[in-house]
Image (spheres, rainbow, N blue to C red):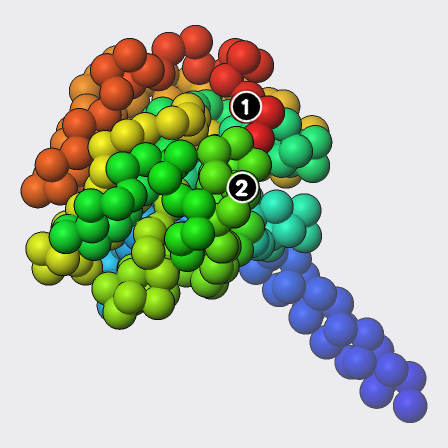
């Protein structure tokens, strides 16, 4: 009996030593820890030129900015996990810690900044209107009374038109801009409103010559990168990365790629953005 007990103790000690050696070997190399490091980034999946998913490919200005920032934060491209971030879910994705940051045509405004923090901006767009190519009666936001206007759930674009320009406009919300474009082409709605760079991409990719952007911008839309509230160190690092992206020419290359073939030219007054991280960029709406 004593021999059996002795053998059992010896075997247990041997297993413990082997486990300890294995654990030490894993931590000392650091390779497993590094390869397991991931960053989850929320983007749009349905915005050509900005955040667009096709198969396993993710393209657009937002994804290029996200890749650049992630690299500056210490993540390679294969360590990025892309997650769809519809307009209506962007804050909740951050608050519930489902993503580490959101780069999804995310206008920096006060209501949003009360629940999440913003870095940026990395681009400044403006609200505009998309109509059918043969449309003549709609010439700007003040000519939408009695018309059917489409925008996306979670976006403030259509509500701004109703509050500030045409209080008798009929609003229709859709889950994504692709659905708005389909409704516009079919005649279900008369116009679509959101940021000009988004509309230009949609018209080029999905319009087949049937759509046009009016070219009557009526707001300032600074795109920020959303992070969880209180992540001040991360905000500073992202702001620094955006500044580097502008300085080294990567920003211009990304914008040129995003807008190629759309006929869209960024507003030179605000682009590339300056004073990255300044609170004055945060809009009321």
Q: What residue is pinned by disc 2? A: 167
Q: Residue furthest right?
A: 1
State which mark lies toward you, 1 or 2: 2
How far apart are labels 1 and 2 at the CA level? 22 Å
Taking depth in this image into account, of 15 and 209 the one nearest to the observer is: 209
> Does the rendering let one see residue 197?
no
Residue at the spot 25% in from the left edge and 50% down from the top edge: 131
Residue at the spot 32% in from the left edge and 35% down from the top edge: 140
Dot 2 lies on which element? loop
Q: Are marks 1 and 2 in contact (CB under 8 Å)?
A: no
> Does the rendering let one see residue 278?
yes
Query: Which x, y percent locates residue 265?
Result: 17, 27
Q: What residue is pinned by disc 1? A: 283
Query: Which x, y percent locates residue 36?
Result: 48, 54
Query: Would residue 278 appear left or right of 12 to someone viewing this image?
Result: left
Residue at the spot 68% in from the left edge and 69% down from the top edge: 14
Residue at the spot 62% in from the left edge and 35% down from the top edge: 112
């Amino acid at each position: 009996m004593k021999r059996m007990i002795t053998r059992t103790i010896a075997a247990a000690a041997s297993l413990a030593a082997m486990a300890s050696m294995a654990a030490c070997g894993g931590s000392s190399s650091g390779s497993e820890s590094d390869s397991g490091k991931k960053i989850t980034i929320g983007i749009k999946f349905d915005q050509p030129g900005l955040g667009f998913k096709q198969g396993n490919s993710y393209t657009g200005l937002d994804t290029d900015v996200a890749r650049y920032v992630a690299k500056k934060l210490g993540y390679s491209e294969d360590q990025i996990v892309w997650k769809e971030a519809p307009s209506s879910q962007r804050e909740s994705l951050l608050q519930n810690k489902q993503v580490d940051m959101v780069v999804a045509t995310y206008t920096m405004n006060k209501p949003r900044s009360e629940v999440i923090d913003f870095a940026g901006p990395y681009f400044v767009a403006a609200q505009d209107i998309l109509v059918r190519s043969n449309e003549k009666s709609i010439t700007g936001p003040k000519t939408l009374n009695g018309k059917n206007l489409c925008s996306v759930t979670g976006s403030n674009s259509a509500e701004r038109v109703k509050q500030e320009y045409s209080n008798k406009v009929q609003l229709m919300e859709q889950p994504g801009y692709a659905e708005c474009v389909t409704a516009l082409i079919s005649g279900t709605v008369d116009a679509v409103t959101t940021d000009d760079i988004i509309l230009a991409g949609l018209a080029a990719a999905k319009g087949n010559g049937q759509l046009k952007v009016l070219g009557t911008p009526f707001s300032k839309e600074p795109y920020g990168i959303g992070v969880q509230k209180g992540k001040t160190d991360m905000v500073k690092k992202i702001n620094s990365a955006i500044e580097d992206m502008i300085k080294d020419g990567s920003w211009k290359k990304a914008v040129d790629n995003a807008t190629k073939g759309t006929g869209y030219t960024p507003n030179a007054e605000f682009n590339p953005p300056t004073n990255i991280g300044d609170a004055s960029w945060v809009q009321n709406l």
